[in-house]
Image (cartoon, rainbow, N blue to C red):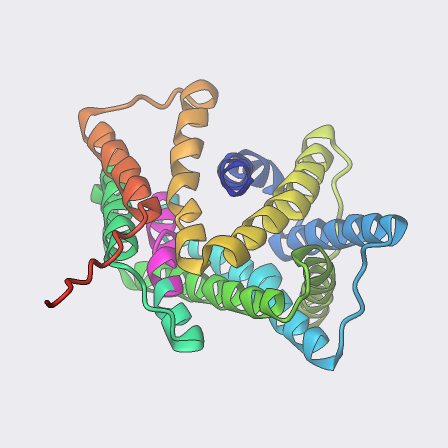
């Protein structure tokens, strides 16, 4: 079951980049994100209420949902969208793939869980592999003051994503299911995004084209309701550091889709990157060998 959720998450989030590109246009980015998670929260609450699966949260649970909404459904998206204005999307993907390493560090800080050597080595292999995959884009980019802003924002977004993973893990340890916590967190994230739009004077325009509405529905339901629920369920089952390797595989799926949509062509360097990413995946999910204790006669 966990493998199925893992593959589902990678395929969904690896394809959302198409919908994200379709969202860019007349509607402000912050408003589009608010529409996305507002609709996702509405769908989740409707499903939970109709199926009788909505859990009652105590004050601690609601507080954690508020923080999770800030980390996963508000601040990190603002960081990533704005980072993409200053640096290539490939560099954003490489920085985001560091979530595996951030999650390993934060799991140790929050839960005293030591990451295995396989997970750390696999994360580094994946990071190096993405570097090869996006090498032409990275090599042609010149460092500037704006680049430093972009890198900083992408790192903040990744750290925020990692904190959201820790909060979800704590919620699941307390017995709260991702479906319920995601519904509340998406609602809180939406309210914070709406407040930000009001403070900054961002207009709540809407585009009724098939392109915009279709991409919004895909991002809200498969991309958010299904994708985030599947991913955070993996965080609870597999641990934050292993689940986060999904972030390394997302760009790989996106590049394969780009072969058919945008005419992307694989190169020798990119194939080396692909091999490193797959090797990292094997290392991350390899079970550590049990220690053999020698009997002393």
Q: Main secondary structure of the magenta part?
A: helix
Using the rendered image of the protein, determine whether residue 91 is visible from the camera's viewpoint: yes
The answer to which of 268 and 210 lies nearer the viewer is: 268
Q: Is residue 49 left or right of residue 145?
A: right
Q: Is residue 196 above or below residue 34?
A: below
Q: Is residue 65 left or right of residue 285?
A: right
Using the rendered image of the protein, determine whether residue 137 is visible from the camera's viewpoint: no
Q: Is residue 96 inside the magenta stretch?
A: yes
Q: Is residue 223 above or below residue 239?
A: above
Residue 109, percent from left and from top = 39, 76
The answer to which of 15 and 173 lies nearer the viewer is: 173
Q: Is residue 232 left or right of residue 144?
A: right
Instruction: Name the image quarter holding the N terminus.
Output: top right
Highlighted range, magenta:
90-103
Question: Which residue is painted at 54% across and 34% down in the image?
Answer: 18
Instruction: Name the image quarter holding the C terminus.
Output: bottom left
The answer to which of 123 and 191 lies nearer the viewer is: 123
Residue 71, percent from left and from top = 56, 67
Question: Which residue is painted at 58% across and 52% down in the image?
Answer: 233
Q: Within the image, what quadrant is residue 169 found in?
A: bottom right
Q: Residue furthest left?
A: 297
Question: Which residue is painted at 69% across and 56% down in the image?
Answer: 34
Q: How many marks?
A: 0
Q: Residue furthest front?
A: 297
Q: Within the image, what quadrant is residue 112 found in?
A: bottom left
Residue 32, percent from left and from top = 67, 50
Q: Is residue 246 above or below residue 95?
A: above
Residue 113, percent from left and from top = 38, 69
Q: Is residue 59 inside the magenta stretch?
A: no
The answer to which of 31 and 105 lies nearer the viewer is: 105
Q: Residue furthest right?
A: 50
């Amino acid at each position: 079951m966990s493998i199925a959720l893992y593959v589902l998450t990678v395929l969904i989030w690896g394809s959302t980049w198409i919908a994200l590109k379709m969202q860019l246009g007349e509607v402000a980015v912050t408003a589009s994100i608010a529409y996305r998670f507002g609709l996702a929260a509405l769908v989740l609450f409707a499903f939970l209420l109709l199926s009788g699966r909505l859990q009652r949260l105590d004050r601690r649970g609601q507080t954690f949902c508020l923080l999770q909404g800030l980390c996963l459904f508000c601040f990190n998206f603002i960081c990533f969208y704005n980072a993409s204005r200053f640096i290539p999307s490939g560099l954003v993907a490489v920085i985001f793939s560091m979530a595996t390493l951030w999650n390993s560090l934060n799991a140790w800080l929050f839960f005293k869980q030591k990451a295995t050597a396989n997970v750390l080595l696999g994360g580094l292999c994946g990071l190096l592999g993405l570097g090869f995959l996006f090498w032409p884009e990275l090599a042609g980019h010149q460092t500037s003051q704006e680049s430093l802003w972009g890198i900083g924002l992408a790192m903040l977004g990744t750290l925020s994503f990692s904190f959201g993973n820790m909060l979800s893990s704590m919620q699941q340890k307390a017995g709260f299911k991702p479906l319920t916590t995601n519904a509340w967190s998406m609602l809180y994230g939406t309210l914070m995004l709406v407040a930000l739009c009001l403070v900054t004077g961002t207009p709540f325009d809407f585009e009724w084209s098939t392109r915009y509405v279709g991409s919004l529905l895909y991002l809200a339901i498969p991309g958010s309701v299904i994708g985030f629920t599947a991913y955070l369920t993996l965080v609870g089952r597999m641990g934050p550091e292993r689940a986060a390797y999904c972030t390394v595989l997302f760009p790989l799926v996106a590049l394969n889709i780009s072969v058919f949509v945008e005419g992307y062509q694989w190169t020798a360097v990119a194939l080396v990157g692909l091999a490193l990413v797959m090797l990292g995946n094997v290392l991350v999910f390899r079970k550590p060998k049990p220690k053999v204790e020698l009997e002393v006669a």
